Amino acid sequence: MNAERETPIKIRQVKYLNNIVEQDHRAIKRRTRPMLGFKTFRCARILLSGIELMHMIAKGQMQGGGIRQTPAEQFYSLVI
């Protein structure tokens, strides 16, 4: 495959390459494991997006347009 390309592809063999992704999904796994499953895809999508939103707010990734808010205030402003 590298013979056909101008720039060769380098294969990185790192044992723990996907740990960052797994660590990011740890919060979802912790919350969804006690559940018996999701009844519909719609319910799963809504619940998982809410968990992701709360995780982003807790990590400080949601900025309120220059307005300084607590995580609870940010969540309530999105709900209402």
Image (cartoon, rainbow, N blue to C red):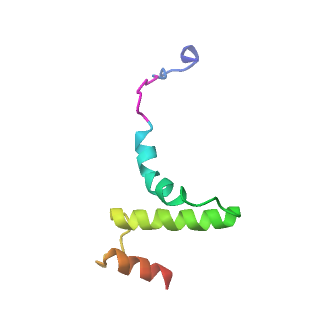
- As drawn, the residue found furthest toward the top would be 3
Quadrant where the N terminus sits is: top right
State the residue in front, 51 or 62. Answer: 51
Q: Is residue 8 magenta?
A: no
Decide: is 27 above or below 68. above
At horizontal 45% and vertical 45% (from top left) the residue drawn is 21
**Name of the residue lying farthest toward the bottom:** 80
Q: Is residue 49 left or right of residue 20?
A: right
Above or below: residue 51 compared with residue 25: below
**Quarter assignment of residue 67:** bottom left
Residue 9 position, x and y percent, is 49, 23
The correct choice, above or below, for 25 with respect to 53 in the image is above
Q: Please state if 49 lies on the left or on the right of 27 as rendered.
A: right
Which residue is more in the foreground, 78 or 4?
A: 78
Give the residue displayed 54% in from the left and 64% down from the top.
49
Image coordinates for residue 10, horizontal then vertical, percent: 45, 22
Q: Exactly how many numbered labels are in the figure?
A: 0
Could you tell me residue 60's position as x and y percent? 33, 65
What residue do we see at 49% from left, 64% from top?
51
Q: Main secondary structure of the magenta part?
A: loop
- The single residue placed furthest to the left in the displayed view is 68
Q: Which residues are magenta?
A: 11-17
Residue 62 picture quarter: bottom left
For the residue pair 41 and 8, the one nearer the viewer reads as 41
**Relative image position of residue 76 (x, y in whole percent):** 43, 82
